Image (cartoon, coloured by chain):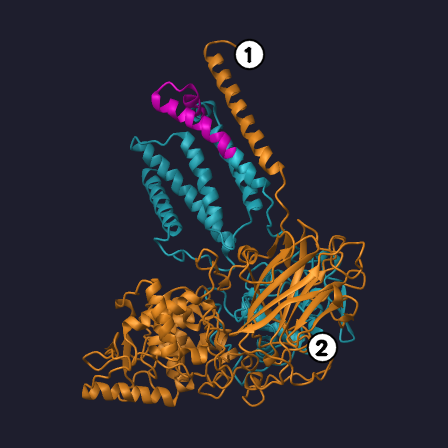
Chain colours: A cyan, B orange
Amino acid sequence: MKALMSLGALIGVAGLLLLGGMFFDIVPSTTVRLVEGYMPIQLLLEVACYVIGFTGLSYMMNAMGMALPRFWQGIGFWVFLMVYLKYRVYPPIPFSVRAMYGTVGLVTVFMWISANEEDWTKFKQPILNVLDAQTGGKRLLRYLYLVLLPILIGGFSFNAMMPKSEEPIELRTVHPAPPASTKVHGKTYTLQTSQNPYRVNPEGKYDQEFSNANIVEQGMGRLMKPNANPWDDKNQGYLKYVREGGEIFFQNCHFCHGDNLNGRGLHAFAFNPIPANFTDPGTIAQLQETFIFWRVSKGGIGLPNEGFPWASVMPPWEQHLTVDEIWKVVLFEYWHTGYYPRTWD
Amino acid sequence: MMDSITQKAGIIAAAAFGVVLVSSAGYSSVSAQGLPEGFKKGELAAEPSAEMIEAGKRVYFTKCVWCHGVDGAGDGPGADRLWPRPRNFNQGTFKIRHTASGELPLFDAKKPIPGQNDLFETVTHGLPGSAMPPWEGILSEEQRQQVLSFVTTQLVKDRKFTDKQSESQTVLQLADLKPKPATDESRKRGGELIVEKKCVECHGMEGRGDGNAFNLKDDWGFSIQPANWHKCWNFRGSRQDPYNVSNIFRTFSTGVNGTPMPSFADNTTVDERWDIANFVNSLCERDPLGNPLPIDPLTDKPKINFVIPSDMVEGEIPTDLENEAWKKAPKRYVAMGGQITHKPRNFVNRLDDIWVRSLYNDKYIVYLLEWDDRTKSVAEGKLPWAPTQVNIDIKEQDPKTGEEGSIAAQQNNYAVYNDAIAIETAVKWKELPAPIKPRYLFGTNEQFPMDIVKWEADGSLRAFKGTGWDKDFEERDNYEEAMKLLKAEWLNGRWYVMIQRPVGNKKDQDYDEDTFFEVGQYIPTVFFAWDGHNGDAGRKMAVSAFYYTFMNPPVPQETYIYPVVIAVGVVLLEGWVLTRRSNKKRGKTL
């Protein structure tokens, strides 16, 4: 048990030092990178590590006779949460959302410190001590609070009331419900039954297993399988069409969606929100191939009313590309990100 | 190429005979070994292992081939719609280096160390202002080294990184050279030196890259433009650290291979180079306090604030840029991307930002728009289609993998149209029912149109109505009298345009066609811009996202009263808590 706790304490100290170092620019802020696409799970793991670390730390300090009062433990943990949310998470979370997390965090901390009568008394004690002001130091502290609190609260409310011009927040539907069918270049496609005509094996048969075996590998870099180079001239079927799709992608789509399909293209910086990131497991990995076909063909303008607001400049690509080209681009996007399209069943 | 070869020959000759070159200013800029000051001889790195090269091939054919091409000749499928074009690796010509002009860049497959591995840093940080993204976080360090091993051994065909006979390494010792503090004196001297060293001939009098924007070609004959010193985040060698003066010092010391930018190592001292670097760095856009603009790590461009505040002035709105009101008005960076959704599409966008300020009084609102454009363009050719038209039936250039007739090859050879700028605001923005937002570009429909005000370099100021995503603009001929062009001037590579329009009211204006500007409200605003020398006309233009014009209301009285009331309330509350506590302790209850 002791060894386990020491390990926990070590993790806690190391983690705090790292965060502090990154905060004050002593350690480069890229030391522990947030990896695109794995961010939520990474953050959860990190916070879990910190909690383990803090538990160990508090145990060690107890054992060494330097126990931190419950009062400061509670405040410290809450402050840690707020700092973590503000400075660690990127892209930054808006204040309103952080305030929500902060409130939930505060409630949790209260539940923790008031779990039993003894803890609650311990927590209250420092506050009561200041109120009673039996020593000189405490008296000074009490007067400081008496003067500072009204000034601070008055100042905050002045700040809050000053007219400000902050960008209004607009939420948007990420994956609006698709229609049952879509008409592209005069032909109607039923989304539930349509298939990508280029997801075929060398014999020309629709073959999801074959294509899934040849997509890029997950993991750092998302590289192609060693024997599945779309630029090999001998390719027939799937990989040949992946290459053709890639050519169309790099002539039309990468300007916004980026060379690595992560929504960081050459022109992406000018748009708000920035274009979709296909490497994120929340985009094309969650969707059927025909959904992408519909979105590409109809663009931002083709979104249904539930999909408001249409903060999308994606053009209806049917105006620029043929049906075959659109299917090939869709094929390429799944190949390059290493995701399998979702199936209807 | 000729330039760099002669310079290289010069360096070798100097080394052989120990000749001390004396620059025109009389300073000795060459050290005792005959190397330019600040440089040292380096060793060629060992050849990467066969496994590294093989592994790198896999990276190359997954990520790089799409632009750089199968043979690394910079002719992948994406190449022809890009400008600057992707690098042609075959000649071994690389722009950003620590090595002397004409030499191969530093690359060592075993040392991914900043300052000692130029190519690794290029792949890691990308080349801002071009389509080359930073690959850090996407490819692991090892994968980046692998792909470079493949590129340097297999795709660089005319030179060999390990050939001691033909290659040498003269390395700028940037780590040992302490930057000179950017004092006023240093910057002043730098400002004089850029004239003396003829930097301004290409980079322009104000450093906006407008000096010789038309006749410059790179080694492959593609047109190329001098850097705009005011946009340091677009410097190719900025290494995601644009305000770092060392990057400028390095580029200035080593030159940019393959381009007309020479190395100045032979005719400037290290001290002079720091002065120049300090001066160039000081030109980069900064905030009103003189601090570097915050850079968004996701895009490597300045962070964007989507609200354009407009301050109120009493009486006439001043037209003089030096006026206090304009100096105090907050300046917003508006990012611009190419319009690539409707024909004619603008893949090669040359206007990537606009700076906007605004003031209003009881009758008018004025926008002051400033943007860098290397050329003043007033129409010479006649447009083959109406500029209001959309989705016109024109043949787009085939994005073929060759160099003839590509967009990049056409650069600087377009018929010249008018430079122009437009402000688009939503009409009836207050009434838009929830699902309907003014559609991204040209308005929602007949019922909720957009109000477009466009200025062109021929001096015209016209109003249009946009009624739908792919509808032609309708010209409004009765609105022109209401607007006024307060200023339109092109000076040293920058346009200054001031447009005044009524804030509007229901009495005098047309409610169905005019935007009414209301104080304290967010009014959706979009900007369009055209560069006439880029062939921009009609829908071939640069577009911004939706911004909001926000007319700052005067501060209401309550703002000063309520906080005091609240503070007094807190004091009373404190008194109550204290009394209660002391009563409780004494055993009394209230």
Tell whether position A130 is magenta: yes
- Helix, strand or loop at mark 2: loop
Please tell me in which quadrant of the rendered image residue A273 appears: bottom right
**Prevailing secondary structure class for the magenta stretch in the rendered image:** helix
The chain under label 1 reads B
The residue identified by callout 1 is B590
Location of the C terminus of chain B (image quadrant): top right
Is residue A43 visible from the viewing direction of this image? yes
- Does A155 appear in magenta? no
Q: Which residues are magenta?
A: A124-153
Q: Residue at x 55, y 41 (%)?
A: A159
Circle 1 Cα neighbour tier, 10 Å, few/some/many (<14 / 14–19 / ≥20): few
Which mark is drawn over residue A15?
A: none
Q: Quadrant of the N terminus of chain B?
A: bottom left
What type is the residue that disc 1 sits on?
Answer: Leu
> Residue B109 versus residue B81: which sits nearer the camera?
B81
User: Given the image, on which type of amino acid does mark 2 rest?
Assistant: Pro
Among the 4 quarters of the image, the one containing residue A315: bottom right
Q: Nearer the viewer, residue B79 or B182?
A: B182
Image coordinates for residue A40, horizontal then vertical, percent: 52, 52
- Does B268 sit left or right of A189 as displayed? left
x%, y% of residue B14? 23, 86
The answer to whether residue A171 is seen in the rendering is: no
Residue B387 shows which numbered tag? 2
Measured as percent of width and height from the top left, residue B369 is found at 59, 65
- Neighbor class of circle 2 (other Cα within 10 Å; few <14, some 14-19, many 20+) is few
Earlier sequence position, callout 1 versus callout 2: 2
